[in-house]
């Protein structure tokens, strides 16, 4: 049977209500088999361990079987000299795009510790905001026991092996992105229908204007496919 990996990006206490709504919507289609990407300290002012209700919600989901992974630390490029690529594609949120090995290592370590303390176990995998990684970040990640690291076109495993898995991505913060995402909701799943497995990436902040497209895409993507968490790829 073909497979689908659904992930929800940008989960944090700042968007708790929206995160809950979308999680419910996703779970109606996937059950617990999807991956939640949590930002440990969104924009430097929402450390998850300061929000008890959020933490217990997260723990309950984790215990139920939802996969919880680390999504950067701040989801913010705090480097004054934002790169052109970061500015163009992420509005300054390409947190790991220009970090050195040491800088990246410190941030990953801090987020890893926050999430591990909250969950009582480490996050399974790592996805950098906007899938943007500096060489230093790729290097620093070798020092962490993640079961997988997610890139724009691939998912990488601890052995260093990579698997190409295309992704349908939703984003709505500009008119152009909304247009593309609405189009994607129909064409993406159809385009990848021959692929054994593909990813559907949803973003908490981007979705209110795309509610219908997201529902359509979720139902088309999951129809006739087995739902997987990223960590399940290691068992295939
Ligand atoms: Zn993100």
Image (cartoon, grey):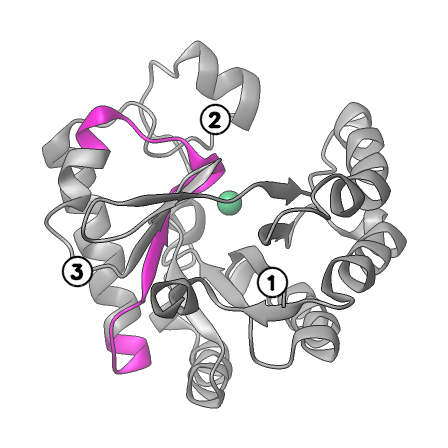
Per the model, the C-alpha gap separating discs 2 and 1 is: 33 Å
Q: Is residue 119 magenta?
A: yes
Secondary structure under tag 3 reads loop
Using the rendered view, name the quadrant where residue 188 is placed: top right
Of 184 and 234, the residue lying toward us: 234
Question: Quadrant where the N terminus lies?
Answer: bottom right
| Identity of the residue drawn at 78% across and 37% down | 181
Image point (27%, 26%), residue name: 134
> Could you tell whether 17 is left or right of 71 in the image?
right
Labels 1 & 3 near each other (Cβ < 8 A): no
Q: Which residues lie in the magenta part?
A: 117-137
SS of the residue under disc 2: loop
Instruction: Name the N-terminal-most of marks 1 and 3.
Output: 1
- Seen in the picture, residue 235 relative to 156 is either above or below; the reply is below
**Of circles 2 and 1, which is in front?**
1
What residue is shown with label 1?
3
Q: As rendered, which of 53 and 167 lies closer to the eye? A: 167
What label does residue 92 carry, if any?
2
Q: Could you say where residue 99 lies in the image, as x and y percent from the top left?
A: 23, 27
Check contact, mark 3 vs mark 2: CB within 8 A.
Answer: no
In the image, residue 173 above or below residue 161: above
N-terminal-most mark, 3 or 2: 2
Instruction: Write down the residue under mark 3.
Output: 145
């Amino acid at each position: 049977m073909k497979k689908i990996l659904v992930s929800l990006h940008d989960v944090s206490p700042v968007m708790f209500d929206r995160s809950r709504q979308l999680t419910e919507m996703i779970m109606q289609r996937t059950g617990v088999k999807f991956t939640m990407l949590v930002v440990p300290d969104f924009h430097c002012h929402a450390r998850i361990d300061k929000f008890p209700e959020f933490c217990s919600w997260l723990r309950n989901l984790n215990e139920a079987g939802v996969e919880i992974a680390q999504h950067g630390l701040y989801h913010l490029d705090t480097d004054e000299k934002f790169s052109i690529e970061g500015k163009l594609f992420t509005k300054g949120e390409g947190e790991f795009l220009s970090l050195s090995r040491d800088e990246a290592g410190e941030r990953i370590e801090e987020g890893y510790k926050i999430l591990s303390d909250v969950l009582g176990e480490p996050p399974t995998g790592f996805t950098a905001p906007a899938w943007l990684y500096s060489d230093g970040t790729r290097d620093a990640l070798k020092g962490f026991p993640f079961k997988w690291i997610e890139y724009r076109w691939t998912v990488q495993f601890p052995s260093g092996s990579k698997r190409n898995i295309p992704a349908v991505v939703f984003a709505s913060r500009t008119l152009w992105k909304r247009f593309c995402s609405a189009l994607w909701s129909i064409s993406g799943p159809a385009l990848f229908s021959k692929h054994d497995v593909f990813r559907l990436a949803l973003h908490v902040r981007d979705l209110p204007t795309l509610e219908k497209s997201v529902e359509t895409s979720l139902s088309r993507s999951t129809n006739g496919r087995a739902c997987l968490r990223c960590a399940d790829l290691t068992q295939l």
